[in-house]
Image (cartoon, rainbow, N blue to C red):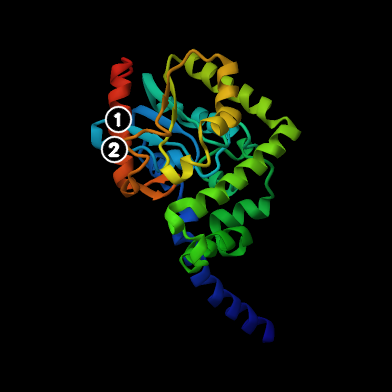
Amino acid sequence: MKISVVLIIVALLLIPLNDFVKQSWAYNNNRGVLAFQDDPSELDIINLGTSHAMFGYAFKPLGLSHLDLALPSQTIEYDLKMLKQYDDHLRPGGVVIVSLSQITFSNAEIGRKENYYQVLDREDIEPVSTFDYYTYTSIPALNSGSVYTALSREIRDFRWESHKPWVNNGQNYSERKYEMVEAQYKQAVENRDIEQNMERLKDIIAYCQAKDYRVVLAMEPVHASYNAYFDQAVMDRLVYQHLASLELDVPFLNYMDDERFIHQREYFHNPDHLNGKGRTLLSSLVYEDLKRLGYL
């Protein structure tokens, strides 16, 4: 009898917690890909990348069929996995935007492999326990990582004032991000992750060219407060020197310090992610640049 009561109580607690997790942004940040799975169509353009690219592009209002394959902290390795999973829908001569960021060459681990459980074949995902896989897809309330991620995003509005993104005009946020990126880069140098990611970027370009896709590299805009930490010298060290050594024969659309954005806080959700208004402007600029290149 006692066991039955306990089980009933646990079930009653799990039901609302399960619904809470399933409604959270973290659980649904791949919803665009899931929607495409349910209703696929021929695509004009695909973009890869991290959260910078997730919030960067919206080409459908411009008349293009577009699939966003970027996810938070996505590695170059997973960029290629996502592209291979969905590029059968890309029209001949279609466009692939490979988004670069401050962590492109130093990022060796995906942020949350759970993001990929429903959008990649299981064998393409890093080793994962059967329990984690099925609890996440069926009963995420039993997946502690999913619960923590959902809760942490919901309570972020209650964080210390000094940790809010626009305190001190974004400088506090940008300094924290800079310190995290520098620590990651130092670790990447020690682990030789940079060389590995350089090879993976070459693999993406080679794959696109073999399939006759029009491939471009791109970097999304950031606010001036963020750019102050990730200036030309820092970006040369983190990204540009490695990119130059690859000698890739593809266009690079670099909007990082674009004057149309950099001092316009109205275009940003936080110092390194665009909001809806910024996304609309960037998409229109990329659209025109792709036309100029003869890619559209």
Q: Position of residue 161 (x, y in %)?
A: 49, 66
SS at mark 2 in the image: helix
SS at mark 1 in the image: helix
Q: Position of residue 163 (x, y in %)?
A: 52, 60
- Name the residue nearer the viewer: 24 or 248: 248
Q: Relative to residue 218, is residue 11 depicted above or below?
A: below
Q: Position of residue 189 (x, y in %)?
A: 71, 32
Q: Quadrant of residue 64?
A: top left
> Residue drawn 55% across and 49% down?
175
Q: Quadrant of residue 122?
A: top right
Q: Position of residue 92 (x, y in %)?
A: 37, 17
Instruction: Kindly report the distance in space between the C-alpha atoms of the residues bearing marks 1 and 2.
Output: 6 Å
* Residue that sits furthest to the right in the current view: 190
The circle on residue 281 is 2
Residues marked 1 and 2 touching at CB (< 8 Å): yes
> Residue drawn 52% across and 15% down?
248
- On-image quarter of the N terminus: bottom right
* Residue that sits furthest to the bottom in the current view: 1
The circle on residue 285 is 1
> Residue drawn 57% across and 55% down?
136
Amino acid type indicated by mark 1: Leu
Residue 109 visible in the displayed image: no
